[in-house]
C-alpha cells in the first residue's frame, strides 16, 4: 500500500511540474502581439491624401493602433492618430516628398510592437486650362519632318510636304518645303489643314509663311497672289462663313508674307459676318494661289508656316548688320549685283577696322542694279526714322558718268513687282573715294524724295507700310560699273 501511495505522489508531482512548464510557455507566447501589418490606400487622384488600415494575425479587437503619418510640418493632433481597427486618414502637403509611416500596436499586459513603411507623394500641379496641343506644333510647319501639321489636305492640287527646296538661298536655305502644283484641272484648287482647338484670333491673329512662285509655270491671266482663308471645318459648306486676306507675290524668289487678321484688310464671304478677331469658330486654314474659279496653272512652294503673335516687336537684329556672321540680316537679296555678305574688308583702317563687310559689284549688266532686304514687322518711321551705314567705293571700278552716290530707299514689298511705285528715298553723295565714310539717312528730315505713281505723296514719318530697304550705288537706269562695300548698317 505504501508503494502505491509513493508512486501516486510521484505522478502528481510530475503533472504539477509539467503544468508549470506549459504555463510559463503560454505566458511568454501571449505577451507578444503577433502578425502586425498595415495597408496604405490612396484617397484622391493627386495621391497626397491617404488612409491606413492596421491589422494583426490573428485579429484582436482589444488592440489599439497608433498611426504616425510622419509629417514633421503637420498638426500633431492629425499626424498621430489612434484607432481600434477602422481606417484613419491624413492629407499631406501638395508637394513631392517621402514620408515614413509608423504603426504601433498596444495591448495592456503586452509589449508594444511597431513597424514602418515609406510613402512618396508625387505631386504635379496641372494647368487648369491646358492647351490640347503645344503652340509649337499647333499650326506651325517647317516641312523638315519634325512635329509639323499632320492634317494637310490637297483639293485639285498635287502636293508634296517634303519636296527639295527649289532655291535654297536668300531668306530660305532650308532643305525641304511644301510643293503646290495647280495644273488647271480644278476651278477652286487649294490646300488646307484643320486644327483643334479653334483659333483664338483675339489673342493670336497672325499667320506668316514663306512663298516661292515659279514664273515659268504660270498660265492664263490670274494675278500673282496668295490667299489665306479661315473657315469652320464643321460646316457642310465651310466657305460660306469664311474670311480671307489676299497678298501679292513676287516671282522666282522666296518672300515672307504676313496675314494679320487684326490689322490687315480682310474679306468676309458673308458681309454680315463679324470681324475675324470677334469670332471663335475658325478651325481650318485654306491656302490658295492665283484666285478662285479659273483653270490657270501655277507651281508654288511654301515654307515656315507659323501661327502666333510675334509681330509685337522687332528682334535685336531687326535691320542691323555688321557682316561678321553674328545675328545679321537674313533676307539680303541682290538684283543684278554680285553680292558677298562676308567679304574681307578691303581697307581695315580709319573708321572701319572690322574683318568682314558686304561687297557690292555692279558690272553694268542691269540698268536698275541694287541690293535689298525685307523686315517684319513694318518699320515705325515715326519713332525710329534713321538709318546709318559705312560705305567704301573703289575708284578703279567706276566707269561712265554716274555720280558717286548711294541711295537708301524704303518700299512696301506687299506690292510685289510694283513696290518701287510708292517708295521714298534719300540720296547721299560720296565725296571721298577709296576710304570708309559714314552716312546717315534720316527720314524725319526734308531731303527725302517720294515716287508717287499711285497718286499719294505723304511724308515717310506718316507711313506704316514700309517693310523693305533698297540700297543702290551710282543712280538709276544706267549701265555704268561700280564696286562698293558696306558695313555696320544700323536702324534706330
Image (cartoon, helix red, strand yellow):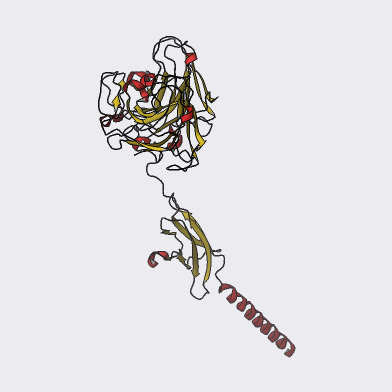
Residue 254 picture location, percent across and down: 46, 25
Q: Quadrant of the N terminus?
A: bottom right
Q: Which residue in the rendered view is the most extreme toward the right?
A: 3
Q: Is residue 151 visible?
A: no
Q: Is residue 343 visible?
A: yes
Of residue 431 and residue 290, the one placed in the foreground of this image is: 431
Total marks shown come to: 0
Of residue 413 and residue 272, the one placed in the foreground of this image is: 413
Residue 259 picture location, percent across and down: 36, 27
Instruction: Examine the image and state in which quarter residue 196 appears.
Output: top left
Instruction: Determine whether 56 is above or below 454 in the image.
Output: below
Residue at coordinates 27% horizontally, 25% vertically from top-left? 274
Q: Which residue in the rendered view is the most extreme toward the bottom?
A: 2
Residue 455 picture location, percent across and down: 26, 18
Of residue 230 and residue 445, the one placed in the foreground of this image is: 445
Horizontal side of 103 relative to 25 (left or right) equals left
Instruction: Determine whether 313 is above or below 209 in the image.
Output: below
Instruction: Examine the image and state in which quarter residue 89 appears.
Output: bottom left
Residue at coordinates 47% horizontally, 21% vertically from top-left? 364
Residue 329 picture location, percent across and down: 44, 35
Instruction: Examine the image and state in which quarter residue 305 appears.
Output: top left
Of residue 461 and residue 113, the one placed in the foreground of this image is: 461
Instruction: Determine whether 376 is above or below 115 in the image.
Output: above
Q: Quadrant of the C terminus?
A: top left
Residue at coordinates 57% horizontally, 65% vertically from top-left? 35
Amino acid at each position: 500500500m505504501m508503494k502505491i501511495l509513493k508512486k501516486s505522489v510521484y505522478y502528481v508531482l510530475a503533472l504539477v511540474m509539467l503544468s508549470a512548464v506549459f504555463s510559463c510557455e503560454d505566458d511568454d507566447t501571449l505577451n507578444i502581439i503577433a502578425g502586425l501589418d498595415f495597408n496604405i490606400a490612396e484617397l484622391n487622384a493627386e495621391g497626397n491624401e491617404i488612409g491606413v488600415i492596421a491589422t494583426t494575425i490573428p485579429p484582436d479587437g482589444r488592440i489599439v493602433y497608433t498611426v504616425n503619418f510622419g509629417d514633421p510640418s503637420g498638426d500633431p493632433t492629425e499626424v498621430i492618430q489612434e484607432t481600434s481597427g477602422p481606417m484613419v486618414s491624413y492629407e499631406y502637403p501638395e508637394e513631392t516628398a517621402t514620408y515614413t509611416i509608423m504603426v504601433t500596436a498596444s495591448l495592456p499586459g503586452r509589449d508594444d510592437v511597431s513597424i514602418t513603411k515609406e510613402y512618396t507623394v508625387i505631386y504635379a500641379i496641372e494647368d487648369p486650362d491646358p492647351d490640347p496641343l503645344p503652340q509649337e506644333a499647333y499650326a506651325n510647319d517647317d516641312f523638315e519632318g519634325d512635329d509639323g501639321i499632320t492634317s494637310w489636305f490637297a483639293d485639285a492640287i498635287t502636293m508634296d510636304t517634303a519636296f527639295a527646296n527649289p532655291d535654297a538661298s536668300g531668306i530660305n536655305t532650308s532643305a525641304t518645303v511644301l510643293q503646290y502644283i495647280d495644273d488647271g484641272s480644278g476651278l477652286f484648287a487649294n490646300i488646307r489643314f484643320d486644327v483643334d482647338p479653334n483659333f483664338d484670333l483675339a489673342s493670336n491673329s497672325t499667320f506668316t509663311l514663306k512663298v516661292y512662285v515659279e514664273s515659268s509655270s504660270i498660265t492664263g491671266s490670274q494675278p500673282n497672289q496668295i490667299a489665306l482663308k479661315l473657315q469652320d471645318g464643321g460646316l457642310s459648306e465651310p466657305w460660306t462663313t469664311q474670311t480671307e486676306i489676299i497678298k501679292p507675290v513676287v516671282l522666282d524668289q522666296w518672300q515672307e508674307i504676313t496675314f494679320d487678321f487684326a490689322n490687315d484688310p480682310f474679306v468676309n464671304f458673308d458681309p454680315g459676318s463679324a470681324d475675324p478677331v470677334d469670332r471663335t469658330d475658325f478651325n481650318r486654314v485654306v491656302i490658295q494661289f492665283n484666285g478662285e474659279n479659273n483653270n490657270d496653272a501655277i507651281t508654288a512652294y511654301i515654307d515656315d508656316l507659323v501661327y502666333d503673335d510675334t509681330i509685337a516687336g522687332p528682334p535685336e537684329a531687326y535691320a542691323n548688320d555688321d557682316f561678321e556672321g553674328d545675328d545679321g540680316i537674313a533676307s539680303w537679296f541682290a538684283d543684278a549685283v554680285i553680292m558677298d555678305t562676308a567679304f574681307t574688308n578691303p581697307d581695315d583702317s580709319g573708321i572701319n577696322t572690322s574683318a568682314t563687310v558686304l561687297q557690292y559689284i555692279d558690272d553694268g549688266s542691269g540698268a536698275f542694279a541694287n541690293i535689298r532686304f525685307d523686315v517684319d514687322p513694318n518699320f515705325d518711321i515715326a519713332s525710329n526714322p534713321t538709318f546709318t551705314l559705312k560705305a567704301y567705293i573703289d575708284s578703279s571700278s567706276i566707269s561712265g558718268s554716274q555720280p558717286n552716290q548711294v541711295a537708301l530707299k524704303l518700299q512696301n514689298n506687299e506690292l510685289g513687282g510694283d513696290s518701287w511705285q510708292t517708295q521714298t528715298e534719300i540720296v547721299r553723295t560720296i565725296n571721298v573715294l577709296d576710304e570708309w565714310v559714314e552716312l546717315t539717312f534720316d527720314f524725319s528730315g526734308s531731303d527725302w524724295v517720294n515716287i508717287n505713281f499711285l497718286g499719294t505723296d505723304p511724308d515717310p514719318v506718316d507711313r506704316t507700310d514700309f517693310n523693305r530697304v533698297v540700297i543702290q550705288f551710282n543712280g538709276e537706269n544706267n549701265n555704268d560699273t561700280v564696286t562698293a562695300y558696306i558695313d555696320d548698317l544700323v536702324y534706330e
